[in-house]
Amino acid sequence: MNELEGRTVFMSGGSRGIGLAIANRLGREGARVALMAKTDQPHPQLPGTVHTAAEEIREAGGEALALVGDVRDADQVERAVEQTVERFGGIDIVVNNASAINLAPIGELEVKRFDLMQSVNARGTFVVTRACLPHLRESERAHVLSLSPPLSTDARWLANHAAYTLSKYGMTMLTLGVAADEAGAGVGANCLWPRTMIATAAVQNLLGGDEAMQRSRTPAIVADAAFEILRRDPRDCTGNTFMDDEVLAEAGTTDLSAYAASEDADLQLDLFVEGWDSAATQA
């Protein structure tokens, strides 16, 4: 039985990187994916648009709907949700993927950069999830999945980039709030975060260039973990902050060497990660 066959996914972002990998993975399972992203035209330094992403999903075997819009605009989100329901008949899964990052410390961060992260990350998660909730409540297998980290009060996650931490923890707290609020409606809500850095444009351009990319895993590990979460019964799987390798270990995959971005990679732990899990290999 394919639990995702014919299910409708509404994803924020997804033109490239982890979001696109998840969208393609779900498309291969027969899901119908609506992508809402700002990337109507190619960026000179970043590959992919919402249109090329939709085409990739179709090539992977799924149906796709490209929706140009900004998660900071609640009216645009509402219209995108309406278009998704008109096209596919409902919404079963929400993936809060859109995110902005700036690792500057408080004293060096411009107010507009602070506002951007809070608006895209925390507020965007709220706006998208809220708009989709009436349709999720009508689904038999409703999931919300946010790409955000486990909560921690460790000061090292506040030093140097407290504003970014605030925005990502905000995503997590809102998602756990949905799990609590919507338990009676059968809507599952969980968070997913990678154990290691993931080879994306953000890592290449902001977090260390080629060296950081070589110490990363590919987006496929997060995509496969997302699939394993979303195939579960949302009434039993809700209120969790998952790590990608732990999810795969529970599904029987402990050899993760295929996900390394480079051979013999000295993998780098991601932000907000305390250490290696004993159930998962570092390979």
Image (cartoon, rainbow, N blue to C red):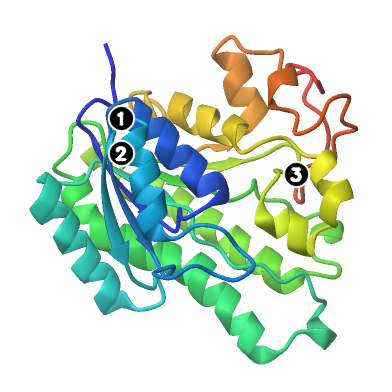
Q: Residues within 10 Å of mark 1 (few under 14, many from 20)?
A: some
Neighbour tally class for label 3: few under 14, some 14-19, many 20 plus, Cα within 10 Å: many
Q: Is residue 133 left or right of residue 257?
A: left
Seen at 13% across and 45% down, the residue is 88
**Which residue is pictured at 48% across the width and 46% down the height?**
20
Cα separation, mark 1 vs mark 2, equals: 5 Å
Residue at x 28% of width, y 17% of height: 2
Question: What percent of the width, then of the height, locates residue 10?
Answer: 31, 50
Q: Which residue is mark 2?
A: 58
Q: CA distance from mark 3 to mark 1?
A: 28 Å
User: Quadrant location of residue 45?
Assistant: bottom right
Q: Secondary structure at mark 1?
A: loop
x, y (%) of residue 173? 52, 56
Residue pointed to by mark 3: 197
**Decide: marks 2, 3 in contact (CB < 8 A)?**
no
Residue 72 or residue 24, whichever sits in front: 24
10 Å neighbourhood of mark 2: few (<14), some, or many (≥20)?
Answer: some
In front: label 3 or label 1: 1
- Dot placed on the residue nearer the N-terminal end, 3 or 1: 1
Specify the quadrant that holds the C terminus. Answer: top right
135 w.r.t. 127: above or below: above
**Label 1 with label 2: CB-CB less than 8 Å:** yes
* Location of mark 1 (residue): 61
